[in-house]
Image (cartoon, rainbow, N blue to C red):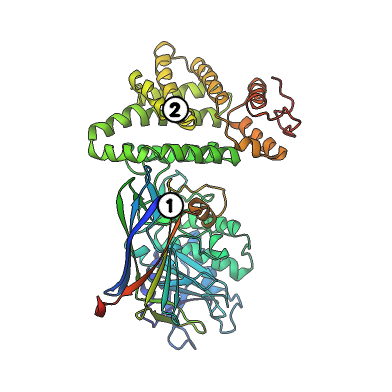
């Protein structure tokens, strides 16, 4: 049985951001620690699905090894208590275009579904100096302690 | 002429890059820029006539005034100052907020850089104004301002441009961090620890010791030192890492509750700081001296006397009796025993103030402590070669005499049958040990 029970989820476009909320109950007697910022995401415009990873499990091999990778933000989840993990992404983000030196705006305005993965553990993460690259250490830290949820998006018009 | 800034698009912020470049050249007025020919208004060309003799200014001089022949369009290195909503591809179809890396330098024609130039993208908005941090040589978190990020990325760019870029990412990063420290010197900032590539945005990670952090103030020098002792002496090899994983697991079964209680009671916070955290930090400072200057008993004694003057309050006997209720051999050995030893040290200082004699006494205490190191199942999982390596490490830090090594080898044979069934650590100082 997972230490965290999902009590509810929501995803909505609020202003110029997509806000995702996961309400969890820590059913164990130990404090747990969960990611609380978006580490990576995948936008599929064809299926209008946004996959958000509050976890490093989806990092590419290149990023797992990347020495610039920063530590994730972590949220403390007190034992036997409810908690809310809230993250957001801009509805429009910028990136280098695929074929020129221009920067392009990508809109996720018509997103229909958000799939979210949340990693956690019962001890805080500690970086081991001289150990494997950070991405690998983070993946090992969370192990199989991950929650996956599929959330329909609430657009401003139909909220 | 080789260095260019992206401009002419709402998602790039060349003025911020110009400010950072100005800091790098030490506000040398010889730096400037002009619209780049044949760039359709998307690039500014950096110009530089150097008057400053600092290393960073010389580096910019090289970057600006060398033709590296990278790009057929003669735009060798392009810098994009972006904000925190800029995303970089991770190479597998996913996107990563640039705030998860602070800055990135792309080889030509790679995911994220469709051009034939080297592309530097960095977050001039400092992670939505929360600020980036990295680890300094003191072990504390230090800031990672825009000019330092840019200088760091330009180090990677130069290595790519002149063919010295290392494909071993840890080596390349180390080299860029060594360069970065030149810019830190100019800014009068603490040097970055070039062996620790970790960093983050906003507040730091949970500290190595949550009780110590709260009790002594966030990122105090002492907690940083504690972290260094942990990482440089103790958390090494499979045995050290395994030990700390077990210690953390047991420690975090109760410490968050203690922290919550401390947040409600200043009295409790002060009591924990004085009677538990300060003694532990004192003991680790003494241990640091024991390890870093082996055989210098007088120096060890002097450190004991200095720490005793700073931390004269012994942990009350009533508290020492209650602590073992935590029932964890890792907590007992790693935290409680050092606190007990500090109480004994303070008593010893009352009767003995000769540094060399104190140092001699403390060495005996550390040897007894070392012999009681709890043994976990990981010892049985080590190959002979790994076992030899781990024992070598222990010989350097904890088990420094033949007698200790022999006694510890006997304990391994007795308690977990290592060495008893023909599995001997090869080439180890333990091989010839008695016991």
CB-based contact (under 8 Å), mark 2 and mark 1:
no
Name the subunit of mark 1: A
Depicted A154 relative to depicted A35: above or below:
below
Residue B419 lies in quadrant: top right
In this view, the residue in front, A2 or B287, is A2
Q: Is residue B213 visible?
A: no
Q: CA distance from mark 2 to mark 1?
A: 39 Å
| Comparing labels 2 and 1, the label whose residue is closer to the camera | 1
Residue B83 is drawn in which quadrant?
A: bottom left
- Dot 1 falls on a residue whose secondary structure is loop
- Quadrant location of the C terminus of chain A in the rendered image: bottom left
Q: Residue furthest front?
A: A1
Question: Which residue position is annotated with label 2?
Answer: B283
- Asked if residue A100 lies left or right of residue A80, the reply is right
Q: Nearer the viewer, residue B376 or A74?
A: B376
| Residue in the picture at 51% in, 53% down | A143
The outermost residue toward the top is B351
Residue B382 vs B131, above or below: the answer is above
Residue A145 locus on image (x, y percent): 46, 54
Q: Residue at x 33, y 52 (%)?
A: A25
For image coordinates 43% across by 72% down, the residue present is B87
SS class, disc 2? helix
Query: Where residue B321 appears, x then y in whole percent?
Result: 38, 20
Closer-to-camera residue (A43/B173): A43
> Which residue is disc 1 drawn over?
A2
What is the x, y in percent for residue A132?
57, 52
Residue B400 seen in this snapshot: yes
Q: How many dots with numbers?
A: 2
Crowding at dot 1, Cα within 10 Å, few <14 / some 14-19 / many 20+, comes out as few
* Chain to which the residue tagged by mark 2 belongs: B
């Amino acid at each position: 049985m997972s230490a965290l029970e999902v009590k509810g989820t929501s995803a909505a476009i609020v202003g110029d951001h997509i806000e995702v909320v996961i309400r969890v109950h820590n059913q164990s007697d130990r404090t747990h620690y969960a990611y609380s910022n978006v580490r990576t995401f995948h936008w599929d415009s064809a299926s209008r699905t946004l996959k958000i990873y509050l976890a490093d499990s989806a990092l590419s091999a290149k990023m797992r090894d990347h020495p610039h990778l920063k530590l994730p933000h972590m949220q403390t989840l007190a034992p036997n208590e409810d908690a809310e993990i809230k993250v957001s992404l801009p509805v429009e983000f910028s990136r280098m275009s695929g074929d020129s030196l221009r920067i392009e705006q990508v809109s996720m305005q018509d997103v229909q579904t958000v799939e979210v993965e949340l990693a956690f553990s019962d001890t805080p993460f500690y970086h081991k100096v001289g150990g494997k690259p950070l991405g690998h250490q983070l993946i090992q830290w969370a192990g199989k302690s991950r929650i996956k949820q599929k959330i329909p998006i609430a657009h401003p018009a139909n909220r | 002429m080789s260095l260019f800034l992206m401009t002419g698009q709402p998602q790039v912020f060349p003025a911020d890059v110009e400010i950072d470049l100005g800091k790098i050249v030490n506000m040398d007025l010889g730096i400037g820029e002009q619209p780049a020919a044949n760039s359709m208004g998307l690039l500014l060309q950096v110009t530089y006539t150097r008057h400053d003799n600092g290393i960073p200014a010389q580096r910019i001089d090289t970057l600006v005034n060398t033709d590296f022949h990278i790009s057929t369009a003669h735009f060798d290195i392009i810098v994009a100052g972006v904000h925190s909503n800029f995303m970089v591809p991770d190479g597998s179809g996913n996107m990563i907020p640039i705030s998860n890396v602070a800055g990135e330098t792309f080889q030509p024609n790679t995911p994220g850089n469709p051009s034939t130039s080297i592309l530097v993208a960095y977050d001039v908005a400092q992670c939505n104004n929360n600020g980036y941090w990295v680890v300094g040589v003191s072990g504390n978190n230090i800031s990672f301002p825009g000019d330092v990020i840019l200088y760091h990325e330009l180090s990677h760019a130069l290595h790519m441009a002149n063919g010295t870029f290392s494909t071993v990412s840890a080596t390349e990063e180390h080299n860029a961090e060594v360069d970065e420290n030149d810019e830190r010197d100019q800014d009068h900032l603490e040097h970055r620890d070039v062996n620790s590539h970790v960093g983050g945005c906003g507040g730091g990670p949970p500290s190595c010791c949550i009780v110590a952090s709260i009790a002594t103030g966030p990122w105090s020098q002492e907690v940083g030192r504690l972290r260094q002792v942990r990482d440089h002496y103790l958390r090494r090899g499979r045995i050290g890492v395994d030990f700390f994983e077990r210690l953390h697991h047991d420690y975090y079964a109760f410490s968050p509750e203690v922290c919550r209680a401390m947040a409600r009671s200043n009295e409790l916070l002060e009591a924990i700081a004085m009677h538990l955290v300060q003694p532990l930090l004192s003991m680790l400072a003494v241990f640091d001296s024991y390890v870093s200057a082996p055989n210098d008993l007088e120096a060890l004694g002097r450190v004991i006397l200095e720490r005793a003057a700073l931390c004269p309050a012994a942990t009350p006997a009533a508290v020492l009796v209650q602590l073992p209720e935590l029932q964890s051999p890792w907590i007992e050995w790693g935290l409680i025993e050092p606190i007990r030893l500090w109480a004994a040290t303070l008593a010893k200082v009352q009767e003995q103030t000769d540094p060399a004699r104190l140092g001699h006494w403390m060495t005996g205490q550390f040897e007894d402590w070392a012999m009681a190191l709890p043994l976990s199942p990981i010892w049985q999982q080590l190959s002979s070669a790994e076992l030899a390596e781990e024992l070598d490490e222990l010989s350097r830090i904890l088990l420094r005499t033949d007698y200790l090594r022999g006694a510890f080898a006997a304990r391994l044979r007795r308690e977990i049958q290592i060495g008893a069934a023909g599995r001997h650590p090869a080439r180890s100082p333990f091989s010839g040990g008695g016991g």
